[in-house]
Amino acid sequence: MKSDKPAALDVRGLMVHYGASPIVWDLHLAVPSGHLVGIMGPNGAGKTTFIKAVLELLEGTTGVVRLLGHKLKTIRRKIAYVPQREVVDWDFPMTVRDLVEMGCYPKRGLFRSLQREDHQRIEEALDKLGLTSMAGVQIGELSGGQRQRAFVSRAIAQDADLYFLDEPFGGIDQVSEHILMDVLRALRDEGKTIFVVHHDLVTAGKYFDWAILMNTRLIANGPMQKVFTSENLYMTYGKNLALVEDVVKILSTFAEGRAVHGGA
């Protein structure tokens, strides 16, 4: 049954140029609400550029973008963004709690005092990401995984409807990765839509239920079981990439298992 709800993300003719070189080329895609979406492609494919363009963080962008059926400026408070860790000033004198509190200001207003419900949401966000005991720690003292959890905790406190995470699993420990995935799945189950720039093709199949494959242009967009195929992976990454061969073997084994057991 087709949903009457507007698409979480609807992109028409999105293009981004750096000088004369196109980084994102004529993207047309729509993603329905309530999915955990993996955005995948090789280095330099334009994945980070794509989400920054959607969030109007770049100049030199053309095309039409609708988020939940609206222009960004009308629903900005409903959108949370977690950038790559490399762009953060980790020496800034801010504690984990200070960082998470920032998630409440888009809805409350920068110059208004936080209310009881805000503080409750902050505590819940810290608890979900396993950071309660670290609330008073300066953010630069955190490990890589803890840093990423802190920024996701801020996004949780914002209580957004759309989440954009740029490589949240890059260089983090396995415990943090499991915690993050449990939180992202819970958000999806609440009806939120989460977009994740992701590099690990081996874990992608079990992490996401929707996939966007791109390499400057769009290769495929749709439910994971339909899009995450050997043909699309070869088109995205190239036939000489060893990792694709490994993933194709995994896909083949998975398909054989479904055939033996009559599907799932």
Image: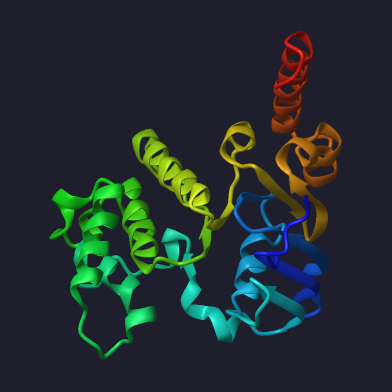
Q: Residue at x 20, y 77 (%)?
A: 115
Please say which color scheme the image uses: rainbow
Q: Quick one: which residue is furthest to the bottom in this view?
A: 111
Question: Could you tell me residue 156's position as x and y percent?
Answer: 37, 60
The mark tally for this picture is: 0
Q: Residue at x 81, y 79 (%)?
A: 20
- The vertical placement of 170 against 254, above or below, is below
- The vertical placement of 43 against 103, above or below, is above
- The vertical placement of 204 against 128, above or below, is above
Q: Quadrant of the C terminus?
A: top right
Question: Could you tell me residue 165's position as x and y percent?
Answer: 51, 58
Q: Quick one: which residue is furthest to the top in this view?
A: 260
Quadrant assignment, res 67: bottom right
- The vertical placement of 50 against 2, above or below, is below
Q: Residue at x 76, y 26 (%)?
A: 248
Quadrant assignment, res 105: bottom left
Quadrant assignment, res 243: top right
Residues 180 and 238: in front is: 180
Q: Is residue 36 visible?
A: yes
Tell whether 26 sits left or right of 6: right
Tell whether 202 sits left or right of 214: left
Q: Is residue 91 visible?
A: no
Question: Could you tell me residue 257's position as x and y percent?
Answer: 72, 13
Question: Could you tell me residue 78's position as x and y percent?
Answer: 49, 73
Q: Residue at x 70, y 47 (%)?
A: 211
